[in-house]
Image (spheres, rainbow, N blue to C red):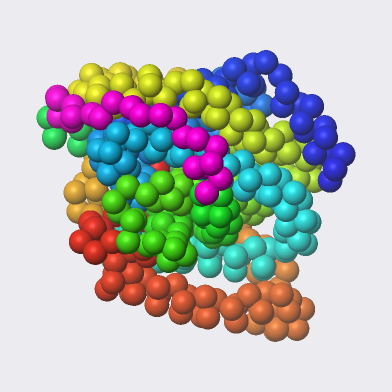
Amino acid sequence: MLQELFEGLLLILRFDTLLMTGVGLVLGILVGSLPGFTTVMAMAVLLPISFFLDPLVGIPFLVGVYKGGIYGGSIPAILVGIPGTGASVATTFDGPALAKKGKSRKALDMALYASVFGDATSSILTIFLIGPIALIAMRIGPPELAVVLALSMAIIATTASGSLAKGMVMLAFGMFLSLVGQDPIGAVNRFTFDIFAVQAGIDLLPMLIGLFAIPEILLAVESRISAAAKVNKPEGDPLSWQELKRSRRTILRSTFLGGAIGAIPGVGQVVAAFMGYAAAQKAAPNPETFGKGDLDGIAAPEAANNAVNGPTMVPLLTLGIPGDNITAILLGAFVAQGLRPGPQLFADQGPIVYALLGSMVIACLLLLVLGWIMIPVFARVVAIPRAYLVPLTLIFAVAGTYVYRSNPMDLVFLVVFGLFGYGARKLKFDVTPLVMGFILAPPLEYAIGQTLLLSQGDMFNYIVNERPVTLALLALIPVLLFFVFRNHLFAGAKGRPGAKPGARNVPTKGG
């Protein structure tokens, strides 16, 4: 492991990788600074760029967009009181209050330092823990993998924003769409209706861009927003070392809390931010200052939501299970580069995996430098009307979809999924379960087929007598689902964890 880690670090320390990671960070912060434009949309639109780059350049570029977008959402949350991304909603509780006191620069500095610390710490822990986890994953056979995939899809569907029934419907529809094309075992055409263009199945790229980028464009056009909100300028003294030191316990607490949440598929940055905020308020000697301009109210949610970034790579890289819609886009980048995440990836290309994980830490260090230098610049970006950027986003979406395979049918899928995603947003359906169902159903189907072959038709006796781990996982499913359902119902009745009285409900998905 240590040798592969060292080789990976040598692979990633190259100028083009550092340059494109920095470019990704700047683009991510830019999008995060624009209220209404999400990190997911930016990654979906910019995903095709990574296909034309070396894997050790293209994927770090997307990692930069990811990390920059999550941090960038704090800038409008502080200066305007409007979260740039869902992950920064909790930052609006204290950010605008600090800006009104003339301490917006302190708030922006605290958001940057807490974000970098939380992200870097969780990424470093991920690097050292993912190797042993991958060794365990390599011992997982088809029966165990089938159970883990089924459980992951169930958790994702039940933790989606909106009603439980809507999440399950979207999951089922995504699984159905994955069946279009050829059977992975028997190579029999399914649901193609004799249309040659869909015999190879539906490609992931037009689906991702259609579901995550096109609805944002249509909603921006529909809202007809041409004027920007009033923006508070960064003013006041920078954050002092003593002020940062006073918040060290809050930042550490939120970092480990966010890291633990990040390893759970389907939870995400929003829940981590609210839980970090609630924990900080509960532990504070003067909790009544929260919501009135407390620096810990910035440090807690920003450290927590950025600490999610590293551990979300654990289920993605070890089992090929994306934990949220952002890692689903990263999975598309891995597959397009010929890197199929899963236990075998560590065995075949361990140094490359560690190189990509190392790029996450490098991105954090670059974020610290670029963020500190360019805070005044990105503060002005907040005032740019979205109407100026919508046409450019649409051009990138269409061009990126077409140049990937030069297949006109992909543009048809782009439009279809774009309209579907727009309708889903209007009807309060979360499309994340659909994407997860589409991605995870094929390996689930293949694992079940392999299990049937291994069991020679007698699956019950095979699992009971020869696969004790599978039996234990099956017994664990109802217990886990009970807690997931209970938490889902509690959240629906009481509101989100840590939400202030009267605070609006927010979706559970960051980005």
The picture places residue 251, in percent across and down from the top left corner, at 53, 50
Which residue is depicted at the point 64% across and 36% down? 361
Residue 137 as seen in the image, left or right of residue 191 = right
Residue 416 as seen in the image, left or right of residue 147 = left
Which residue is depicted at the point 56% across and 45% down? 245
The picture places residue 57, in percent across and down from the top left corner, at 62, 23
Q: Check the picture and name the quadrant holding the C terminus.
A: top left
Residue 346 appears in the figure: yes
Q: Is residue 185 magenta?
A: no
Residue at the front extreme, as displayed: 242
Q: Is residue 92 above or below residue 280?
A: above
Closer to the camera, 75 or 452?
75
Residue at the right extreme, as displayed: 3
Closer to the camera, 88 or 441?
88
Q: Is residue 322 above or below residue 458?
A: above
Which residue is depicted at the point 68% across and 49% down? 125
Residue 441 appears in the figure: no
Hey, which quadrant is residue 167 in on the image? bottom left
Hey, which quadrant is residue 365 in on the image? top right
The tally of labels here is: 0
The picture places residue 204, in percent across and down from the top left corner, at 46, 39
Which residue is depicted at the point 72% across and 33% down? 355
Closer to the camera, 95 or 24?
95
Q: Which residues are magenta?
A: 225-246
Q: Is residue 279 above or below residue 461?
A: above
Q: Most prominent secondary structure in the magenta stretch?
A: loop
The picture places residue 134, in percent across and down from the top left corner, at 74, 54
Q: Is residue 226 magenta?
A: yes
